[in-house]
Image (cartoon, rainbow, N blue to C red):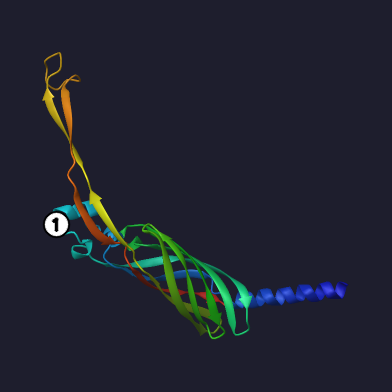
Amino acid sequence: MKKLLFTIALGLGLLTANAQIQSFAGPRLGLVYISASPGSTFLNGDMKLDDIFDEGTSDYAEVAKGTLTSLYGWQWESRFADGGNVTGIVEWIALVGGMEKGKFLPSVSSMVGARTASGLEFAIGPNLSLSGFAMVFGMGYNFKSGNLNIPVNIAFVPGRKGTYSQEEESDTEWIGNGPDDQYGTADDIFETTIEKEAYGPIDYNTGSRFSITVGFNLSK
């Protein structure tokens, strides 16, 4: 019985060691390009959706610009299947962009995929950012230098179409003095006028994102 327990413990230890060797969890650095969208203009410090009404266009992409920004974050991962030369993996990636621009643009992804013994991998899963939920598609390859793993990954998050409109504006107008017949006192009479005038709709995209990240991980 003791030999059986020892054998099981040894086997689990070897599997754990093998999982650590195959894991590329660790820090991530990279770049992401965000196409013309509210997210890109947030990073550029440009106009908001409301400002488009003054531009005389209904297409946000005609006046907005894409942007390139840095990425910093961390990847966690685990294995759920081992087919010898192919391993099933689940990855969780948390990234922050825009820091060099003084902005904070976070995103979190959960991806399921497969990794081969050569270090090639493919994965897909949901992504959550300030633009909302989307799907992320990724692939990567691990470059080795001695005991150092250098996983390089590229990912694509397609944008979604949307429309925005502004339906009304309000204005407060001074009507006259109050009972004390003095201007500028608390009993002055004001009137609020609401103009129900429609603007838009404006077509926009949440922004497609193309990213490349590089990680660092020591084999054990």
* Element assignment for label 1: loop
Q: Report whether 120 appears left or right of 191.
A: right
Residue 112 drawn at (x, y percent): 52, 71
Residue 51 seen in the figure = yes
Q: Which residue is drawn at 59% across and 79% down?
A: 87
Q: How many marks overall? A: 1
Judged from this view, the residue extending furthest toward the right is 1
Q: Residue at x 34, y 62 (%)?
A: 98
Q: Report whether 25 appears left or right of 128.
A: right
Q: Which of 168 and 179 is in front in this view?
A: 168
Viewport quadrant of the N terminus: bottom right
Residue 212 drawn at (x, y percent): 39, 74
Which amino acid is tagged 1?
Glu
Residue 44 seen in the figure = no
Quadrant of the image occupied by residue 42:
bottom left
Q: Which of 42 and 203 is in front in this view?
A: 203
Q: Report whether 117 appears left or right of 209.
A: right
Viewport quadrant of the C terminus: bottom right
Residue 142 drawn at (x, y percent): 49, 81
Q: Which residue is drawn at 22% across and 61% down?
A: 60
Q: Is residue 201 above or below residue 1?
A: above
Q: In this view, does 194 lie above or below 188?
A: below
- Residue that mark 1 sits on: 55
Quadrant of the image occupied by residue 154:
bottom left
Q: Nearer the viewer, residue 122 or 195?
A: 195
Residue 85 drawn at (x, y percent): 60, 85
